[in-house]
Amino acid sequence: MIFSFDLLVNAIVSGILIGAFYAAVTAGVTLSFGVLDIVNIAHPAFIILGSYIAYIFNITFGLDPIVTAIVATPAFYLLGAGIYQIYYVSFEKRGQESMRGLAFFFGLLFITEVMLVLYFGVDYRYVEARYIGPTWHVASLDIPLRILVPCLVSLLMIAVLQLILTRSFVGRAIMAVAQDQLALKLMGVDPVRIKRIAFGISIATASIAGAFLIVIQPVEPSVGREYIGRVFAICVLGGMGSLPGTLIAAMLIGIFESLTSTFYGPSWAPAVSFGFLLLTLAVRPAGLLGR
Amino acid sequence: MRSDVFFVVCLVVGGIVFAAALALGNDYYFFAGYVVLQYVVLSTAWNILGGYCGYVNFGSAAFFALGAYTTVAMHRLHPMPIPVDVVFGGVVSGVVGLGMGYLTLRLRGAFFAIATLALAVVLQTLIVNWDYVGGSRGAYIVRPESIAPFGNYIKYLFMIMMLLAVGSVTVARVIERSRLGYGFATIRDDELAAEASGVPTLRLKLIATTISGALMGMAGAPFPYYIGFLQPTSAFGLEYAVNSIAMPLIGGTTSWVGPLIGAILLGSLQQIATVTISSAVNLLIVGFLLVGFVIAAPNGVIGLVHKYIQHKPIGRVGRRKIEADAPKAAP
């Protein structure tokens, strides 16, 4: 019994650690899907793109993947702003965002994945860093540093994002654009510009989340697809546009996935998030901390 | 044209294509044609929900694989003729579509789309863990060398897929012109207004999801016999999901002609590109065409043709242009 109790505690702790990483992966979708109502299903593809950029700089210059990713955020921000501009002109302005907008992002997801396959092949790639490898042993707990470091940085990132959203002028304007575009316009703020900034930030988080991903596990181009269901399940469960809700939901799903893979086998873990998604949609569509 | 006449005309066209492939005397045309026809069924099925109702299904691969794996499971139980497999594959996929729709269609459209994406991942997890149908290792289906009136087995498979294609195009056309189709169109144009006017939107959406899912399952049912060795990664391939969205959107979503044109154009293009260039590059072509068309030609090939025809009478273009511009000139 003592053995299985240890197993249980270990599973829960690693679930919490992984959950914080999931929160970083989902933060961008919380911004785009939750706040802006843009169903960016290509988000996981941008995360994989972030992983590969961290990989290239790590392999050629030996740079730390997470530092590289933070330096690369302005480039991702510009990419996001550009994509939003195309999305706005071709779909939102014409009122066709529901179907053609979805197909547009699906196409982006597909193109990114195929390009990465053509360029890097389907081999698993991994990075080197000092914190990859060692594990801390606290009592009966095993805490691998390769998961602890992303977890801490991702908590920091979520905190910074939350501060930006609640304290800064732009952040408050972003929350306002979700509620009432016309009122924002009357206050003399251009809603399209605010949305462009918000979408840029959302894609910028993908760069950092991508670095976390390649630190935690080896990456190949189609890994992103596993994250689509998970990311949206977390976003919906957390209550759409709420970052604290996202963090709680991410940890919940992390814990349940970790328990499932410990006690039933890792191949069943992907089913957990889908179960949560369906359950949330059927029982409480507003999510945990929904407005 | 009446629907039964249309069906007969389609059958005759199908027969001519079959005869033409026979006359060419190379089995490759049957192998390539089978894939194109399979995409005709898939994209027509997708369009019944996506084009008519405006609900995007990203899980075409899941429904397709469900049909294929139903066949594998039945083959393990007891080998049966393919038409029976097709019926069972259709029923299983239809029921799953109904269940999915019931859970997610009451909410905004985006949730349905996301749930279909997740469905593909979960079904793949189930199949990978299910040893009876081969699990992650895959399953062999040994197809007979030949079958009575056709000789070669691929001709038989080609004919089955041709019948399915003719059937699904006819179903799509019948729906389009029926009360059901008008109901679907109201959902696409304004669901809230439709609901307020007494259209039973949920029931109609469920009907569309079931029909669409069932047709995709039917398209997947003969697949194990075609490929011979079925693996989860090939049955759940992303190219099915992408193609069944790209083909209707490139052809045009509002009528049955669109997915047919899209599937024939894009399907043949991919067959040619696979042979001449490489299979990864041809997927890239599909991706770029999809994004290009949704941005630049929202109504697909049909929309482009309509535009061209409208502008064709050259002598009257000037006057038409003035007429078209007139309302905009007013402040």
Image: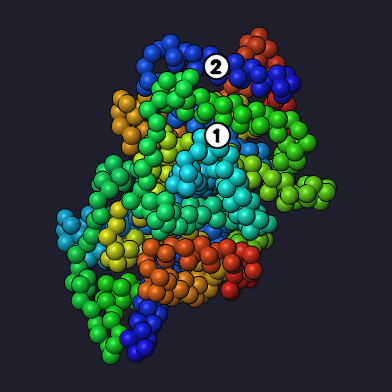
> Can see residue A78?
no
Residue furthest out toward the left? A61
Specify the quadrant of the image occupied by residue B106: bottom right
The colour scheme applied to this rendered structure is rainbow
* Residue occupying the point 60% across, 45% down: B91
The chain letter for the residue carrying disc 2 is B
The chain letter for the residue carrying disc 1 is B
* Residue occupying the point 66% across, 61% down: A180
Using the numbered discs, state the Cα–Cα distance from disc 1 to disc 2 in whole angstroms.
19 Å
Task: Tell me where residue A57 appears, x and y as whole percent.
Answer: 22, 57
* Residue occupying the point 57% across, 16% down: B13
Residue nearest the viewer, comparing A222 with B223? B223
Residue nearest the viewer, comparing A4 with A211? A4
Within-10-Å neighbours for mark 1: few <14, some 14–19, many 20+:
few
Specify the quadrant of the image occupied by residue A54: bottom left
Residue B268 drawn above or below residue A277: above
Amino acid bearing label 1: Pro
Residue nearest the viewer, comparing A53 with B204? B204
Secondary structure found at label 2: helix
Task: Tell me where residue A118 appears, x and y as whole percent.
Answer: 29, 41
Which residue is under mark 2?
Answer: B15
Amino acid bearing label 2: Gly
- Please indicate whether residue B34 sits to the left or right of residue A11 in the image: right
Residue B214 drawn above or below residue B19: below
Which residue is under mark 1?
Answer: B83
* Residue occupying the point 49% across, 13% down: B19
Q: N-terminal of the two: label 1 or label 2?
A: 2
Task: Tell me where residue B177 appears, x and y as whole percent.
Answer: 74, 30
Residue A106 drawn above or below residue B146: below
